[in-house]
Amino acid sequence: MDRRIVSGLLGYLTLFSGAAMIPPFVLAACFEEVNGAATFLLSMFLCLAATFELERFGGLKGKDNIGVREGLAVTGLGWLLMSILGMVPYLVGGWLSPLDSFVESFSGFSGTGATVIEDVEILPRSILLWRSLSNWIGGLGIIVIFMALMSQFGRGAMFILQAEATGPTKERQMPRIRDNAKALFTVYVVLTCFCAAGYFLCGLNPFAAVNHALTTIATGGYGIYNGTVSEYGNVWLEICMAFFMIVSSGSFAMYVTAGRRGIKTIFKNTEFRVYLQIITVAALVVAVDLFIEMNVDIFTAIRSAFFHVASLSSTTGFVAQDFDTYPPISKFFLMMTMFLGGCAGSTAGGLKVARIILLFKFIASLVRQKIHPDMISPVKIDGRVINDDIIFGAAKFFFAVVILDIIFAFVMMFDGIDFINAVSVSVSTVASVGPGFGIEGATSTYALLPDFSKFFACIVMFFARLEIFTVLVLFTPSFWSGKNW
């Protein structure tokens, strides 16, 4: 482990964090939010001070080689550092306590979108924009955006990108790491612009359109109203939001490839097709259930089912109606979609559809081999044979997610929360959804959680965003051993 390299890269990240606070500062200055402008000015100064301190202990040289350990350390510590710096505006502005500031910041950057603020409508515009920006920066990935904007990252940057990437495979579409990061970032920005334009055409004012676009494409779900989407009651807006939430649940690498090889690439992608099939079936079941059990007219049932399946499967967590009042079957399907999540390489959380496909295909392969012992039955996706290491990795991740769900649920029950609520909050947090059922229902917030559960939720969000094993490595003593550390 080379401390100098790690410190140098973390210094760049803190500088990037300060630069990300410039838009809220400018907004506060333009709307004469004196407290907001002072808050972000002080926050940027603290980021700059942290940069100087880190650069004093380290720095990058032209021939530096970033190894696996450095890549994992920068990714894990970088996310932690950005979340700590991101809490400063909430704390300095006097809006939240230290613990709640940390929860809000971590929830934002991790893309969970679960808030501890019971009345977001009293917040100034600058703070609302910062919440949305934290979602957006964390959605694609702090490291990916950082790489796309930096002119030179050095050799070995692949290890950093792979540590942050989500899904069972870590493929790239271009030979150079930075070119790959730039392509992903370009798609991210373009989709955000189209999304904001769509919301504006649906009747939102420019500020609301931009904020909701940032959190939609990031599948974070922070809103500027307490009722999020339900405040508008706009069917065209709901359709537009559902469309972009589904788009954001697809692999961004797939979109980069589609830009080079044609749009047919998207419809040939097995994972995305299966994802569309899952949400279609789930939406139909929920719609029929609402129509039969709640006597909702068929149009409203389809509208509500489609929107909330898109919202929870993408792990965005926007709310157009209190789905906590839905019948048990609808709740079950909604919870299953949030557990499964979106596609690998997307901004969505959850288990990822690619892993589900791999595990089912692996089970089918084992069954065929039992019937025909001499038969070679490789697992294939899109015509490619999948390496056994990737399949076992998917199985290990599935096991790790279930264990993390159980541990968090147990911690909350120990903290005084009943079993049903503990399981609901656990599944929602591990899947990076935000709203769930019960104590953390569609109209509730993390403010109802005890302090210890809030703190532990941050740990869970950290594990979930970096897909568990990257964070587990940081708790291994041998990882930090070495003469340079």
Image: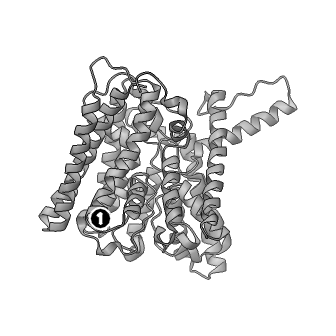
Q: How is the image coloured?
A: one colour
Q: Nearer the viewer, residue 149 or 461?
A: 461
In the rendered image, the residue lying farthest to the bottom is 295
The total number of labels drawn is 1
The answer to whether residue 150 shows anywhere in this view is: no
Q: Quadrant of the C terminus?
A: top left
Counting from the top left corner in percent of width and height, residue 345 is at 48, 41
Q: Nearer the viewer, residue 105 or 128?
A: 105
The answer to whether residue 305 shows anywhere in this view is: yes
Q: Is residue 350 left or right of residue 31?
A: right
Is 199 placed above or below 343 here? below
- How many other residues sit within 10 Å of disc 1, few (<14), some (14-19) or many (≥20)? many
Q: Quadrant of residue 365?
A: top right
Residue in the picture at 65% in, 73% down: 289
Residue in the picture at 31% in, 62% down: 91
Residue that badge 1 annotates:
128
Residue in the picture at 52% in, 61% down: 312
In the rendered image, the residue lying farthest to the top is 63
Counting from the top left corner in percent of width and height, residue 407 is at 63, 54
Q: Quadrant of the N terminus?
A: top left
Q: Is residue 65 left or right of residue 387?
A: left
Circle 1 SS class: helix
Counting from the top left corner in percent of width and height, residue 472 is at 55, 40
Q: Nearer the viewer, residue 313 or 154?
A: 154
Counting from the top left corner in percent of width and height, residue 216 is at 39, 57
Task: Give the residue type that dot 1 points to.
Answer: Leu
Is 88 placed above or below 58 here? below
